[in-house]
Amino acid sequence: MPAENLPQNNEVKFIRVNGGTLPYSVVHRRVRNPRLEFRAEGLLVILPLGWRDETSLLREKMGWISRKHAEITAALEKLGGQANDRSLPIFGEFFEIRRGKSLVFDPGRRVIEFDPADNNQLRRLTAMLKKMLTEELQRAVTHYSRRFGVNFERIRIKKQRSKWGSCSGRGNLNFNFHLVHLPRELIWYLACHEVAHLRERGHGKGFWALVKSEFENYREMEKRLFEYWFFVQRYTDFIPSGKSLGPAQIKPRPLQETPDGE
């Protein structure tokens, strides 16, 4: 979790966790209660405007911080066995990255050749991967829309830092570009999750009953999404986004904690 990637204009501090150091940053917002959020870069401490010191909160929540940190570390070790600087996961399968003069995408051999200094090739590779993901999501969203008897407006794919997907009140479904790195079953699960929100806006019993009707193992799928969230962060800068992305509004639920309970 490199410290240099923490939110800008906030001092980076460190705490001892599980025998190592964890970078964290403090921000003040118009919120009623303080909360903690694990980001790919470290821990984000969100305090109400009236709070001046995070020390007591960190001390109180050290048990939760230690557990989540251990889970994240275990996930990275579990999923990172095949990962290296010369491979890129696409739909859960690792493609070998080779330097070449022109862009070559060979799914049969699981090889991608391109010149990383050529921005045009990078844009073409990004467009290719986005098209593949769009087609996969189109199939999945159409399937679950029919199953749940709902309609959707548009599917949008963007590079995002803090969420896998979201559903707008207008029926637009937004998905993270980096889903392209996940196995297909997780992509389909997330499509099911977001389509279910077209009928059930919150995460109440009705929502989870709907998801469970398609995925009996939805708890396991949620756990895998949690694990993959941190794994794919190593690839977020592999293909430049072309623009700076600010903090997202909706955070992955398993990664945050408020002082009201663990």
Image: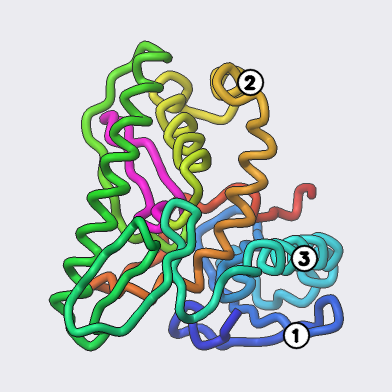
Residue 53, image x and y in percent?
Answer: 70, 77
Say which residue label 1 marks: 21
CA distance separating discs 1 and 3: 12 Å
Q: Is residue 50 visible?
A: no
Residue 13, image x and y in percent?
Answer: 65, 87
- Looking at the rendering, the stretch of residues picked out in magenta corresponds to 163-180
Check if residue 171 falls in the magenta segment. Answer: yes
Q: Which callout, 3 or 2, points at the residue further toward the start of the chain? A: 3
Nearer-the-camera pick, 131 or 49:
131
Q: Residues within 10 Å of mark 3 (few under 14, many from 20)?
A: many
Q: Residue at x 26, y 45 (%)?
A: 156
* Disc assigned to residue 205: 2
Say which residue label 3 marks: 65
What kind of element bears circle 1? strand
Q: Hey, which residue is sitting farthest left in the picture?
A: 120
Against 189, residue 63 (above or below) is below
Against 86, residue 138 (above or below) is above
Q: Marks 1 and 2: CB-CB under 8 Å?
A: no
Q: Specify the amino acid type for callout 3.
A: Ile
* Direction from residue 198 to residue 115 in the image, left or right: left
Residue 230, image x and y in percent?
Answer: 58, 64
Check if residue 56 falls in the magenta segment. Answer: no
Nearer-the-camera pick, 254 or 143:
143
CA distance separating discs 1 and 2: 39 Å
Q: Residue at x 50, y 54 (%)?
A: 92
Q: Quadrant of the N terminus?
A: bottom right
